[in-house]
Image (cartoon, rainbow, N blue to C red):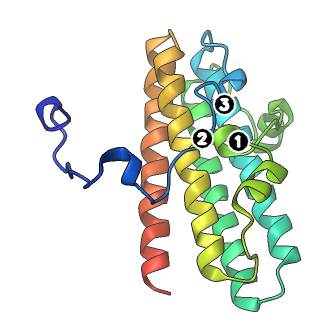
Amino acid sequence: MLAGKGFKKVFNVTGGIKAWHAEIAIGSQDLGMDLFSGKEEPLDVLKVAYSLEQGLREFYLVMGKEAKNEKVKDLFAKLSEIEVKHQMSIYLAYNDISDEELSKDAFEKMVEIKALEGGLSTREYLDLFNPDLNSEIDVISLAMSIEAQALDLYQRVSSKVKNPQSRGIINKIGDEEKVHLESLGKLLDNL
């Protein structure tokens, strides 16, 4: 069915989806959907997306302070910087389509942080995955889980949002999450 819909890389996992033991998105279909009403205009979508990136950046900064291993501290700093770059692209996209250009500080004052990417709170992610915060592999696996959760959320939100321009922005942000997952996979391969 997937190959017939144009997907190029399709694998038949022996045992079907029940045999899948890799990273997956978790939670109910409505997890994180409360962050989006479906009626958002493009500027609103960018503010919510920015807040999710900020929440994740703050999570990485806090976890970096808690880590004892210097390599893990450096890894959390690197993950935090990735979120800063993603935030900057969202901020620039906001100014590209806004009638008035805002400073980054003015933009950040409009943003309300409610959750991390993917719709879960810091405590929920830690309780769910129980990572060893001194293990580089566990930290990258946690980051991959969060990015997979974010991608899943953006894909679900895309089908809910009615404004075509807002939907396009959400799909673009989702594509950036795919790039983040790929980067984290390469980082994991290099350990």
| Residue occupied by mark 2 | 90
The mark lying in front, picked from 3 and 1, is 3
Disc 1 residue type (three-letter)? Leu
Q: Amino acid at mark 2?
A: Ile
Q: Earlier in the sequence, mark 1 or mark 2?
A: 1
Considering only vertical position in the picture, is 147 above or below 133? above
User: Taking 5 as reference, is 127 left or right?
Assistant: right
Does 112 sit above or below residue 40?
below
Task: Tell which circle, 3 or 2, labels the residue nearer the N-terminal end.
Answer: 3
Q: Secondary structure at mark 2?
A: helix
Left or right? Give the position of 41 relative to 134: left
Q: Secondary structure at mark 3?
A: loop
> Tags 3 and 1 in contact by the CB under 8 Å rule?
no
**Does residue 47 lie above or below 78 as drawn?**
above
Which label is found at residue 86? none
In-front residue for pair 36/17: 17
What secondary structure is marked by label 1? helix
Residue pictured at 68% horizontal, 47% vertical: 53
Q: Is residue 58 left or right of residue 43?
A: right
The residue beneath circle 3 is 31
Please rate how many residues cluster around mark 1, counting C-alpha atoms within 10 Å: few if below 14, some from 14 to 19, many from 20: many
Amino acid type of disc 3?
Leu
Q: Which mark is residue 52?
A: 1
